Amino acid sequence: MLLREGDSFVCHGRHGSAGRIGAHVEDRGPLHEALATNQSRVVPTDEARLDGTLADVVGLRGYVVVPLGSDGALVATRAGRRGRPGVVRSREIEALASLAHHAVLALANARLHAAVTDMAIRDPLTKLVNHGEFQRVLAHETARSERFAKPAGHGPSLLMVDIDRFKALNDRFGHPAGDAVLKSAARAISGAVRSFDIVARYGGEEFGVVLPETDAEGALQVAERVRDAVRRTVEVPGKGGKRMITVSIGVATAPGDGATPAELVTRADDALYRSKEAGRNRVTAASTPRSTTRRVAALKTSSRPRQARAGRHARAGWQHAPGRSSRPTRRTPRAR
C-alpha cells in the first residue's frame, strides 16, 4: 500500500518482507497515470523494467496499480510457479478494486478517528494539549520513572509557567488581545523546549511543561530558555508602542520534590508564586529555600521609589523595549 506524503508516496504496508516499508516512490510513470485517471493500470514486466518507478517496492517485474482516490494506491504483483511473474487476470483486478474501495473507507474512518481524538486532547485556542491530557502524560512519566528505578532527581521535571499581569492586560486591552498573547506565548514556549517535551495549557494564563527524564539542573536550563523566549518574542499586538510580555516559572523534579503528579504540581505551583513574589519574570526551583525568595522580594520592595513607600499610588509598568514608552497600567491586588 502506497500513501501520498507531499509530492511522493511512501510504502506503508507490504505482503512478505517488511524491509521495503518506508520506501519513497515518486509520483510519475504508470503510478501517476493510474491516479490521474482514477483507473487501474496493468504494467507488464518489460515496461516495469524500463520505468523503474516501483522497483524499490515490487522489484523489476510486472504489477497492477489500483488507485485509492487521492490518498494513494494499492500495488499488486502475481507470482507464477517457482516465483516467476505471472499474468494479472481481470477477475483479480476486480478483487483488487473491491479491496481498494474498502481501504479508502478504512482510511477515511481512521483519519476521522484521529481528528476526533486530537480534538479531545487539544485546547481549541492555543492548540496545545489540554489539562486532561497534561495530567495523563504527567502520571505516565512519573509511573515510568518509578517503574524503571531512575536515579534520584532524574525526573521527570515539571515547569509551571504563568503570564505576568495577564488580568491587567485583559482589562486594559481587551480579551482579543489577551487571546493573541496566549497563542503567541504557546508558540514561544513550544519553540523553546525539546521535541519530546509536552507543553500544555493548564488553565487560564497558566501553562504546564512536562520534561521526561530531566534532572533539576536540566529543567532549570529549559525554564530559562522558555522565560527568555517569551520575553523576547511575545508582545501585546497592535496597541501602539512595543509592550513585551514576561512569564514567571516554577520548577519541580521527581522524586525529590514529589513522587506523584499532584505533589509535583503543588510544589511547582508554589515555586511559581514565589517567582511572582520575588518580582516576576524569573525562574524559581521548588528546592530553593523560602528565605532566599523572601530576601529577593524584600530587596525589590526596598528599591521602590521613595514616593511609593510614602503612600502614593505606585504604578506598575510593562516590560518595554528600549527607547519605547507607554502609559502604565494600575497594579492589581493579586500577585499575578
Image (tube, grey):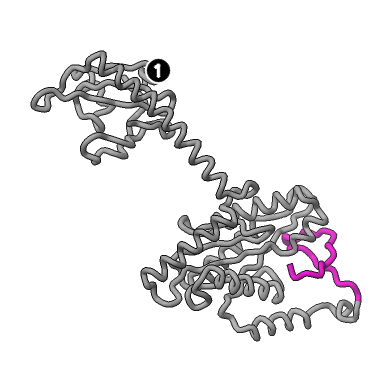
Relative to 58, 182 lies left or right: right
Instruction: Point out residue 7 in the picture as x, y percentages from the top left corner.
Output: 42, 31
List the residue tagged with mark 1: 38
Picture residue at 30% right of the left edge, 22% below the top: 96
Quadrant location, the C terminus: bottom right
The front one of 240 and 323 is 240
Of 78 and 95, nearer the camera is 95
Mark 1 burial class by Cα count in 10 Å: few <14, some 14-19, many 20+:
some
Relative to residue 18, is residue 146 drawn left or right? Answer: right
The residue located at (36%, 69%) in the rendering is 148
User: How many numbered circles are shown?
Assistant: 1
Magenta segment, prevailing SS (helix, strand or loop): loop
* Placement of the N terminus among the 4 image quadrants: top left
Q: Considering only vertical position in the picture, is 86 above or below 207?
A: above
Residue 324 inside the magenta-drawn segment: yes
Residue drawn at (43%, 28%) of the image: 105
Across and down, in percent, residue 227 comes to: 61, 64
The segment highlighted magenta reads 312-336
- Which quarter of the picture shows residue 143? bottom left
- Name the kind of residue labelled 1 in the image: Asn
Question: Residue 6's quadrant in the figure?
Answer: top left
Q: Nearer the viewer, residue 252 or 121?
A: 121
Q: Is residue 270 visible?
A: yes
Image location of residue 174, percent across then percent down: 80, 51
**Residue 147 in magenta stretch:** no
When the figure is inspected, residue 242 is found, relative to residue 270, above or below; the finding is: above
225 or 267, nearer to the observer: 267
